[in-house]
């Protein structure tokens, strides 16, 4: 087995997992891109775990289907169209992962029937090589196993996007076989480059797939969504005790929302500092560890993407929420900008800031910020002298009668790839109607389901009416 193969395995699966545990998680990830029998363009997920790849692929597939096609009946998706959609989607994600537009792409194949000795290296061959994989492997996953599979994978390199697209289309059957999801994941990782990924991940010792539960990491999700394997979902980079924490640097094509934000989960970071204690003849370096906590708050680059499609994360699963109305991703209204700026000064999402920060917020929004006027506003917005400025009164004072820039009512859809999580156990898009209300007019209360709580991190006063008897599940 080559060193590159070992590096890839360590990046994805880690080094501390026992072989038996790796096989257990590995088997849950061994599936292809399979379309639902009940919904022509919906991908089906068989076990927990691979949603970290399947959900982003589904989201980008919907982007192409809804916004690059002129067909009126978008839910009518025949087999040949599905083939084109999937292959073009895979190419789009690979292109996004390609570093600095270098034009160097990789596809990883499984060499069926070869011995370990015959395929001892993943170093690969040029694109002219022929690596055909049958749609249905004669070898069962249990027979192949974790180690055996990795001894049989093979990398192919491409110098142009056109060559890549031709090969992805030619190998359509491979993406549908029981290793299709993993082969695509490995293709993305090698196209990006292992060292490039390690440089972006906050903790390179943490694998992309959790060795205990089999869930994909946030770095893996971000890589597939944005082409960058950063570990955080906030806008831009942050500094903490001299450590640079990488975030999202530009508006994403497809967005991300998480229930963790609604539940006010926090991210715990272990930081290290070094001090030197000097003696008469020597200097001793002392390392100390300390923790810092960051609330999980998705930034506007992911929360307000270019297309009205969002990956939705729960504690254990990823689904997709989407709409066809491009007005949902129109430029933000002044009140929305004000909310976003206010919240940057309220990192713990308390809904208020210390009154000492009011001047900074008003300067950031190009509002009048003379000291006399600031004091006047402090007294008006904080009449009880509590020393805090609440978000609601602040917006009402400076941005009255300004609602969201998007429509107040729109048709929405939700996708969950797990059969058992769907209504009547059929993987189908669930249709609903969303109503977005102002913070002063929240008379209609429909429910308090996880999907609604998650969406409220984007639309704080959204209400949802679904066509099915129950709300869609995030798990």
Image (spheres, rainbow, N blue to C red):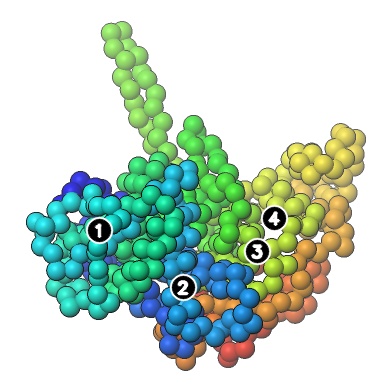
Residue ID at (47%, 66%): 88
| First in residue order: circle 4 vs circle 1 | 1
The residue carrying mark 3 is 458
Instruction: Residue 69: name its quadrant.
Output: bottom right
The residue carrying mark 4 is 351
Which one is in front, 325 or 51? 325
Question: Label 3 vs label 4: CA separation?
Answer: 15 Å
Question: Label 2 vs label 4: CA separation?
Answer: 46 Å
The residue carrying mark 1 is 129
Q: Is residue 471 in view?
A: no
Question: Label 1 vs label 2: CA separation?
Answer: 23 Å
Residue ID at (58%, 59%): 253
Foreground mark, 2 or 3, reads 2
Q: Is the residue 372 above or below the residue 232 in the image? A: above
| First in residue order: circle 2 vs circle 4 | 2
| First in residue order: circle 1 vs circle 2 | 2
Which one is in front, 282 or 343? 343
Foreground mark, 1 or 2, reads 1
Question: Label 1 vs label 3: CA separation?
Answer: 48 Å
Residue ID at (48%, 84%): 78
Q: Exactly how many numbered labels are in the figure?
A: 4
Residue 41 spot, x, y in % from top left: 49, 79
Q: Is the residue 379 above or below the residue 254 in the image? A: above
| First in residue order: circle 3 vs circle 4 | 4
Residue ID at (74%, 72%): 436
Residue 345 spot, x, y in % from top left: 68, 45
Helix, strand or loop status at disc 4: loop
The residue carrying mark 2 is 84
């Amino acid at each position: 087995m080559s060193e590159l193969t070992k590096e890839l395995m360590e990046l994805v699966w880690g080094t501390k997992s026992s072989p038996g545990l790796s096989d257990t998680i590995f088997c849950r990830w061994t599936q292809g891109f399979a379309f639902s029998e009940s919904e022509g363009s919906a991908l089906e997920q068989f076990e927990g775990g691979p949603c970290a790849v399947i959900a982003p692929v589904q989201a980008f597939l919907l982007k192409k289907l809804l916004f690059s096609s002129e067909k009126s009946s978008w839910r009518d998706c025949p087999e040949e169209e599905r083939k084109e959609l999937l292959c073009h989607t895979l190419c789009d994600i690979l292109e996004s992962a390609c570093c600095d537009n270098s034009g160097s792409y990789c596809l990883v194949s499984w060499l069926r029937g070869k011995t370990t000795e015959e395929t001892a290296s993943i170093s690969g061959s040029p694109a002219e090589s022929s690596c055909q994989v049958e749609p249905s492997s004669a070898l069962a996953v249990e027979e192949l196993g974790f180690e055996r599979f990795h001894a049989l994978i093979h990398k192919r390199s491409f110098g142009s996007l056109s060559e890549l697209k031709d090969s992805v289309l030619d190998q359509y059957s491979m993406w549908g076989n029981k290793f299709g999801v993993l082969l695509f994941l490995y293709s993305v990782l090698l196209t990006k480059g292992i060292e490039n990924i390690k440089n972006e991940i906050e903790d390179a010792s943490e694998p992309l797939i959790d060795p205990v539960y089999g869930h994909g990491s946030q770095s893996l999700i971000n890589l597939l969504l944005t082409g960058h394997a950063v570990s955080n979902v906030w806008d831009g980079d942050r500094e903490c005790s001299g450590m640079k924490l990488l975030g999202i640097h530009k508006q994403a094509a497809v967005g991300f929302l998480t229930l963790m934000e609604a539940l006010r989960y926090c991210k715990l970071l272990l930081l290290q500092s070094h001090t030197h204690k000097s003696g008469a003849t020597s200097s001793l370096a002392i390392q100390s560890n300390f923790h810092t906590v960051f609330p999980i708050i998705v930034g506007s680059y992911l929360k307000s993407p270019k297309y009205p499609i969002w990956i939705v994360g729960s504690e254990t699963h990823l689904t997709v929420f989407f709409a066809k109305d491009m007005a949902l991703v129109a430029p933000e209204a002044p009140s929305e900008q004000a909310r976003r700026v206010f919240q940057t000064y309220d990192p713990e999402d308390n809904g208020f800031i210390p009154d000492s920060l009011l001047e900074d917020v008003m300067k950031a929004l190009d509002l009048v910020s003379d000291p006399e006027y600031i004091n006047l506003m402090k007294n008006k917005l904080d009449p009880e002298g509590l020393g805090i400025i609440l978000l609601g009164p602040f917006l009402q004072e400076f941005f009255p009668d300004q609602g969201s820039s998007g429509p107040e009512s729109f048709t929405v859809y939700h996708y969950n790839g797990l059969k058992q999580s769907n209504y009547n156990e059929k993987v189908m898009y669930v249709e609903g109607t969303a109503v977005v209300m102002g913070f002063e007019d929240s008379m209609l209360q429909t429910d308090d389901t996880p999907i609604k709580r998650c969406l409220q991190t984007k639309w704080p006063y959204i209400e949802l009416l679904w066509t099915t008897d129950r709300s869609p599940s995030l798990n």
